[in-house]
Image (cartoon, rainbow, N blue to C red):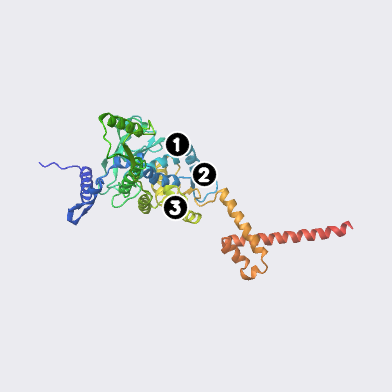
Amino acid sequence: MEQKLPADTIQLLQEASNRAALAARLGYQYGGDRDIYQALGYKTDLDFNDYATQYDRQDVAKAIINRPVSKTWQGQLQVLEMNDDKTTPFEKAYADLDRKLKFKHKFMRLDKLACLGEYAVMVIGFSDVQTLSDMKNKVAVNSKVVYLKPYSQQNAKINRYVTSATDPRYGLPEIYDINVAANNGEDITTGQTVQVHHSRVIHVTVELLDSEVKGIPTLKAVFNRLKDLEKIVGGSAEMFWRGARPGYQAVVKEDYQMGPDDEDKLQTQINEYEHNLRRMLFNEGVEMKEMGTQVSSPKEHVDIQIQMISAITGIPKRILTGSERGELSSNQDEDAWLSIITNRRLEYAEPVIIRQLVDRLMEFGVLPKVEKYEVQWSDLFGKSAKELAEIGKTRATAIKEYLSQPGAEMILPPDAFLEYVLGMTPEQIILIKEMIDNMEITEQNEIEEAEEIIPMEE
């Protein structure tokens, strides 16, 4: 009798087969006669260890992941019940949990791990667990949350998928194999693996296509460029090490006969010179000629790689490298960068991480259930005190120049000056005009009160 494989095993085999087929086609040209990947030394089939190693050792790889994640979670983060100005039981319960579990710190770690691999998970430690074997059971309602622990794809393997086509979670993970020791800094090869039910897990993916479970690692599209950077930067360092210091050629004069002892002495002096033990050479009948240096700047080659990385990741070059290149360019880069982070917050961080956790905590009675709640992020476009002071100084100078020019209001009306020169919104202009009117009314009232007091005193 033919034995059938479990459905989840078949799914895993299909995924592995698809990846292998795709990897086999990478770099092929002219019907397979030329393999660019092989010629350039690129690896075709990448896994989590490749990305993790690159992140751990390469500066640019770390920046590609850390810069967006750090900016996304920058500033204050609040979860508030909507349509209520007072502190509600939901808000108080969330704030208490936040102080205890440090949500934002855990969210940042989870986000980085999700960027590194195809997914990452956050294990929610509920109080209904008596032994580790209880983790494979569904969460009991009205349990408390004891801890939150993020795990990478490497330490959170999917053990079993939901295979019933009538289940709303069809095709999604049902049981995970969590290497709990890896979270405690222990060797993952000797760690303890625990089966964990999906109700105790927040599953996070950064970029999904046809799969609902496994996304595209952030470093995958730029992995070849990162390797090119290592070649260029490492090669330039080696080039400078070997080529910046000129070499010397010992030329024996035609009428001079060098004996064995002379050769040994010359060789000794050259060795000492090379190892910084001497700075002068004394030789008879031998002329030392300097050989030209061979050093060129890698800047243009590095810029090309950085530009390609910036194009696919959306991180402006100035942000990625941390360099300033003119005030106008910097402001444009900053605005574009903040728009990207705003979208990342609203389209990924909030629905995939924050709301998934909050909804799960409400589902099992950890948080009071509410109809609607909102996630309030810090203002990315808010100006610092220094920036506000500079803006105020610039505007004050512009107003002074405007008022000092006779007839300026005939060429540029005050409202147009406020909007197009000072950059104020129509609402701000209306508010300023109302404040001026109130000031005039107040001054008029003070004059009238003074006029009434003077005759009485007389």
Q: CA distance from mark 1 to mark 3?
A: 30 Å
Residue type indicated by callout 1: Leu
Q: Which residue is mark 2?
A: 88
The answer to the question of whether label 2 and label 1 lie on touching residues, with beta carbons closer than 8 A, is no
Disc 3: CA contacts within 10 A as few (<14), some (14-19) or many (>=20): some
In 3D space, how far apart are the residues under numbered discs 2 and 1 (Cα atoms)?
A: 20 Å
Residue highlighted by disc 3: 337
What's the mark number on residue 101? 1
Q: For the residue marked with disc 3, what is the amino acid?
A: Trp
Label 1 secondary element: helix
In the figure, is residue 327 to the left or right of 24? right
* Quarter of the image that includes the C terminus: bottom right
The residue lying at 61 percent from left, 54 percent from top is 393
Q: Amino acid at mark 2?
A: Thr
Q: Tell which tag, 1 or 3, sits nearer the viewer.
A: 3
The Cα–Cα distance between marks 2 and 3, rounded to whole angstroms, is 35 Å
Pick out the residue farthest to the left: 1
Dot in front, 2 or 1:
1
Crowding at dot 1, Cα within 10 Å, few <14 / some 14-19 / many 20+, comes out as some
Q: In terms of secondary structure, where does tag 3 sit?
A: helix
Q: Where on the picture, by quarter, is residue 279?
A: top left
Q: Tell me: 180 left or right of 333.
A: left
First reached walking from the N terminus: tag 2 or tag 1: 2
Question: Looking at the picture, how far across and down is residue 146, in whole percent?
Answer: 41, 34
Q: Is residue 200 visible?
A: no
Residue 432 in picture, x, y percent from top left: 63, 60
Tell me which label, 1 or 3, sits earlier in the chain.
Answer: 1
In this rendering, the answer to whether 51 lies above or below 457 is: above
